[in-house]
Image: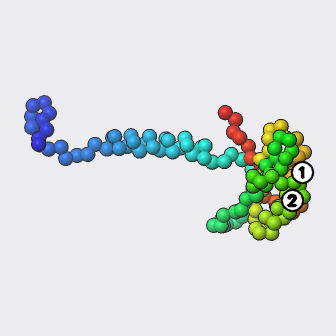
Amino acid sequence: MASTLGGKSKGPIVGINMTPMVDVVLVLLVIMMVSATYIVSKSMKVELPKAASQNDSVASVAAVTIAKDGALFYNQAPVVEPDLVQKLKGAYAANPEVSLIVSADKDTPHGKVVHVIDLAKLEGILKFAINIEQAQ
């Protein structure tokens, strides 16, 4: 089949138009960039580890959540303070490079958050972060 342009026969179309493919790739890139901001956990780092070289191992994380009423949760399981101390001690014994992530309700007293961080420091955990939600 020959294509005609302006009444003249030029032969078959042999070139591929790259514009639609580039448009599709750019749309997929924009979708990925927008959705990636919702996947990443937002946290305000309190103490950053210092190292001369990068370690390929994945650091373990201990997550403590403080509810509005002061209830404590360790890795989403309810605990009382003496059990929390034991779990933090066990996490540090399993991996001295463990990091603590504290998530607290916005109405939780500041002293309760500081107390949990202090408990972790007493057990040897020196890396921690406070989990936050980004304002819209």
Q: From the viewer's perspective, tell me whether residue 76 is left or right of residue 4.
A: right
Q: How many marks?
A: 2
Identity of the amino acid at label 2? Asp
> Residue 83 shows which numbered tag?
2
Looking at the image, which residue is at 57% across and 46% down?
Answer: 36
In this picture, is 30 found above or below 61?
above
> Mark 2: which secondary structure?
helix
Q: Residue furthest front?
A: 78
Q: Which mark is in front, 1 or 2? A: 2
Q: Position of residue 25 (x, y in %)?
A: 41, 44
Question: In terms of depth relative to the viewer, which is nearer, 53 or 56?
Answer: 56
Identity of the amino acid at label 1? His
Colour scheme employed for the rendering of this structure: rainbow
- Residue 128 shows up from this direction: no
Q: Position of residue 1 (x, y in %)?
A: 11, 42
> Mark 1: which secondary structure?
helix
Looking at the image, which residue is at 39% across and 42% down?
Answer: 24
Q: Quadrant of the C terminus?
A: top right
Looking at the image, which residue is at 80% across and 69% down?
Answer: 93
Q: Position of residue 83 (x, y in %)?
A: 86, 59
Task: Classify 10 Å Cα crowding around label 1: few (below 14), some (14-19), many (20 and above).
Answer: few
Q: CA distance from mark 1 to mark 2?
A: 15 Å
Q: Residue furthest top?
A: 6
Contact (CB < 8 A) between labels 1 and 2? no
Give the residue pinned by disc 1.
115
- Residue 84 shows up from this direction: yes
Q: Sequence-wise, which precedes: disc 1 or disc 2?
A: 2
Q: From the viewer's perspective, tell me whether residue 78 is left or right of residue 9.
A: right
Looking at the image, which residue is at 81% across and 44% down?
Answer: 67
Task: Classify 10 Å Cα crowding around label 2: few (below 14), some (14-19), many (20 and above).
Answer: few
The quarter holding residue 57 reads: bottom right
Q: From the viewer's perspective, tell me whether residue 37 is left or right of residue 23.
A: right
